[in-house]
Amino acid sequence: MRGPLPWRAALLLLIGVFGAAFLGKVLAPADFVAEVEDLGVPTSLSLPAAAAVMGAELAICLALVLRRTRAVGVVFAGLALVAFTLVTAALVVDGRADQDCGCFGSLWKRRLGPTAVLEDAVLCVVALWTGLRTSRDGRPLQSRGSESTEIARSVR
Protein backbone atom coordinates (compact mmCIF):
# COMPACT_ATOMS: atom_id res chain seq x y z
CA MET A 1 0.00 0.00 0.00
CA ARG A 2 1.64 3.19 -1.19
CA GLY A 3 0.65 6.73 -0.43
CA PRO A 4 1.15 9.50 2.08
CA LEU A 5 1.43 8.36 5.69
CA PRO A 6 -1.82 10.02 6.90
CA TRP A 7 -3.80 8.34 4.10
CA ARG A 8 -2.24 4.94 4.81
CA ALA A 9 -2.81 5.36 8.55
CA ALA A 10 -6.49 6.25 8.02
CA LEU A 11 -6.98 3.31 5.67
CA LEU A 12 -5.27 0.91 8.09
CA LEU A 13 -7.44 2.24 10.93
CA LEU A 14 -10.61 1.49 8.95
CA ILE A 15 -9.32 -1.97 7.95
CA GLY A 16 -8.42 -2.67 11.58
CA VAL A 17 -11.77 -1.54 12.95
CA PHE A 18 -13.86 -3.55 10.48
CA GLY A 19 -11.51 -6.56 10.68
CA ALA A 20 -11.53 -6.60 14.49
CA ALA A 21 -15.30 -6.14 14.56
CA PHE A 22 -15.81 -9.11 12.24
CA LEU A 23 -13.26 -11.30 14.01
CA GLY A 24 -14.74 -10.62 17.45
CA LYS A 25 -18.18 -11.63 16.23
CA VAL A 26 -17.15 -14.68 14.22
CA LEU A 27 -15.25 -16.09 17.22
CA ALA A 28 -18.49 -16.18 19.24
CA PRO A 29 -21.43 -15.82 16.83
CA ALA A 30 -24.05 -17.02 19.31
CA ASP A 31 -22.94 -14.33 21.77
CA PHE A 32 -23.32 -11.68 19.07
CA VAL A 33 -26.81 -12.90 18.16
CA ALA A 34 -27.72 -12.60 21.86
CA GLU A 35 -26.26 -9.06 21.98
CA VAL A 36 -28.35 -8.13 18.93
CA GLU A 37 -31.45 -9.36 20.77
CA ASP A 38 -30.41 -7.40 23.88
CA LEU A 39 -30.31 -4.26 21.73
CA GLY A 40 -34.01 -4.69 20.92
CA VAL A 41 -34.06 -6.66 17.67
CA PRO A 42 -36.89 -9.24 17.71
CA THR A 43 -35.71 -12.82 18.26
CA SER A 44 -36.99 -13.89 14.82
CA LEU A 45 -34.77 -11.25 13.17
CA SER A 46 -31.71 -11.38 15.41
CA LEU A 47 -29.89 -14.14 13.50
CA PRO A 48 -30.41 -12.58 10.05
CA ALA A 49 -29.49 -9.14 11.43
CA ALA A 50 -26.32 -10.48 13.08
CA ALA A 51 -25.36 -12.34 9.89
CA ALA A 52 -25.94 -9.20 7.80
CA VAL A 53 -23.74 -7.08 10.08
CA MET A 54 -20.97 -9.69 10.10
CA GLY A 55 -21.15 -10.12 6.33
CA ALA A 56 -21.05 -6.38 5.75
CA GLU A 57 -18.05 -5.95 8.05
CA LEU A 58 -16.14 -8.72 6.28
CA ALA A 59 -17.02 -7.37 2.83
CA ILE A 60 -15.98 -3.83 3.81
CA CYS A 61 -12.70 -5.03 5.31
CA LEU A 62 -11.84 -7.04 2.19
CA ALA A 63 -12.88 -4.20 -0.11
CA LEU A 64 -10.58 -1.83 1.78
CA VAL A 65 -7.66 -4.24 1.51
CA LEU A 66 -7.97 -4.84 -2.24
CA ARG A 67 -6.88 -1.86 -4.33
CA ARG A 68 -9.44 -2.49 -7.11
CA THR A 69 -12.35 -2.28 -4.68
CA ARG A 70 -10.87 0.18 -2.18
CA ALA A 71 -12.81 3.26 -3.34
CA VAL A 72 -16.11 1.41 -3.03
CA GLY A 73 -14.97 -0.05 0.29
CA VAL A 74 -14.33 3.42 1.69
CA VAL A 75 -17.82 4.55 0.64
CA PHE A 76 -19.46 1.53 2.29
CA ALA A 77 -17.28 1.92 5.38
CA GLY A 78 -18.53 5.48 5.70
CA LEU A 79 -22.15 4.47 5.22
CA ALA A 80 -21.84 1.65 7.76
CA LEU A 81 -20.19 3.98 10.27
CA VAL A 82 -22.97 6.55 9.86
CA ALA A 83 -25.52 3.80 10.49
CA PHE A 84 -23.60 2.53 13.53
CA THR A 85 -23.32 6.08 14.89
CA LEU A 86 -27.05 6.72 14.49
CA VAL A 87 -28.01 3.39 16.10
CA THR A 88 -25.57 3.97 18.97
CA ALA A 89 -26.91 7.49 19.55
CA ALA A 90 -30.52 6.25 19.46
CA LEU A 91 -29.76 3.54 22.02
CA VAL A 92 -28.04 6.06 24.30
CA VAL A 93 -31.03 8.42 24.06
CA ASP A 94 -33.24 5.41 24.84
CA GLY A 95 -31.39 4.97 28.13
CA ARG A 96 -29.28 1.93 27.29
CA ALA A 97 -25.89 3.53 27.99
CA ASP A 98 -24.94 0.78 30.43
CA GLN A 99 -25.15 -2.01 27.81
CA ASP A 100 -22.37 -3.55 25.75
CA CYS A 101 -22.82 -2.49 22.14
CA GLY A 102 -21.51 -5.76 20.74
CA CYS A 103 -19.40 -3.81 18.25
CA PHE A 104 -16.31 -5.99 18.69
CA GLY A 105 -18.00 -9.18 19.82
CA SER A 106 -15.85 -11.28 22.12
CA LEU A 107 -12.64 -9.31 21.48
CA TRP A 108 -13.50 -6.16 23.36
CA LYS A 109 -16.47 -5.09 25.42
CA ARG A 110 -17.51 -1.56 24.59
CA ARG A 111 -20.22 0.23 26.55
CA LEU A 112 -22.83 2.32 24.83
CA GLY A 113 -22.70 5.95 25.84
CA PRO A 114 -21.63 9.40 24.67
CA THR A 115 -18.02 8.22 24.31
CA ALA A 116 -19.07 5.43 21.92
CA VAL A 117 -21.12 7.92 19.87
CA LEU A 118 -18.13 10.27 19.69
CA GLU A 119 -15.76 7.45 18.69
CA ASP A 120 -18.15 6.37 15.93
CA ALA A 121 -18.51 9.96 14.72
CA VAL A 122 -14.72 10.33 14.56
CA LEU A 123 -14.53 7.14 12.50
CA CYS A 124 -17.15 8.65 10.15
CA VAL A 125 -14.87 11.66 9.66
CA VAL A 126 -11.88 9.35 9.04
CA ALA A 127 -13.86 7.45 6.40
CA LEU A 128 -14.99 10.70 4.76
CA TRP A 129 -11.45 12.10 4.76
CA THR A 130 -10.07 8.86 3.32
CA GLY A 131 -12.78 8.72 0.68
CA LEU A 132 -12.08 12.27 -0.45
CA ARG A 133 -8.42 11.36 -0.85
CA THR A 134 -8.87 8.02 -2.65
CA SER A 135 -9.00 7.81 -6.43
CA ARG A 136 -11.39 5.55 -8.30
CA ASP A 137 -8.61 3.00 -8.80
CA GLY A 138 -7.99 2.77 -5.05
CA ARG A 139 -4.81 4.82 -4.91
CA PRO A 140 -4.35 8.00 -2.91
CA LEU A 141 -5.04 11.18 -4.82
CA GLN A 142 -1.89 13.12 -5.48
CA SER A 143 -1.72 16.79 -4.68
CA ARG A 144 -0.92 19.15 -7.52
CA GLY A 145 2.40 19.98 -5.95
CA SER A 146 3.53 16.35 -5.97
CA GLU A 147 2.44 15.91 -9.61
CA SER A 148 4.56 18.90 -10.56
CA THR A 149 7.49 17.43 -8.69
CA GLU A 150 7.09 14.08 -10.49
CA ILE A 151 6.94 15.80 -13.89
CA ALA A 152 10.03 17.87 -13.07
CA ARG A 153 11.94 14.73 -12.01
CA SER A 154 11.02 12.88 -15.19
CA VAL A 155 12.24 15.76 -17.39
CA ARG A 156 15.70 15.80 -15.85
Image (spheres, helix red, strand yellow):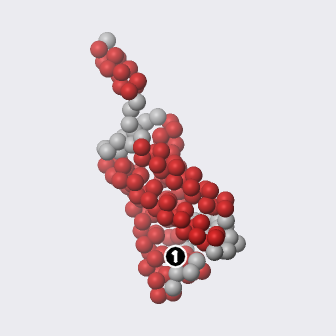
Q: Residue at left 51%, top 87%?
A: 43
Q: Kindly give the residue lying farthest to the top in the view shown.
A: 156
Q: How many other residues sit within 10 Å of disc 1, few (<14), some (14-19) or many (≥20)?
A: some
Q: Residue at left 42%, top 47%?
A: 131
Q: Residue at left 51%, top 85%?
A: 42
- Residue 54 percent location from the top left of the image: 46, 69
How many callouts does the rendering have?
1
Q: Kindly give the residue lying farthest to the bottom in the view shown.
A: 44
- In the rendered view of the protein, which quadrant contains the N terminus? top left
Relative to residue 141, is residue 95 drawn left or right?
Answer: right
- In the rendered view of the protein, which quadrant contains the C terminus? top left
Q: Is residue 1 visible?
A: no
Q: Can residue 150 be seen in this view?
A: yes
Q: Kindly give the residue lying farthest to the right in the view shown.
A: 98
Q: Nearer the viewer, residue 29 or 75?
A: 75
Q: Which of 45 and 30 is in front in this view?
A: 45
- Residue 75 percent location from the top left of the image: 40, 54
Q: Mark 1 points at which residue?
A: 29
- Residue 42 position (above or below residue 8): below
- The amino acid on which the numbered mark 1 sits, given as a three-letter code, is Pro
Quadrant position of residue 101? bottom right
Find numbered disc 1 in the image and state the secondary structure of the residue it sits on: helix
- Residue 109 position (above or below residue 124): below
- Residue 28 percent location from the top left of the image: 55, 74
Q: Kindly give the residue lying farthest to the front in the view shown.
A: 93
Q: Residue at left 58%, top 70%?
A: 90
- Residue 91 position (above or below residue 115): below
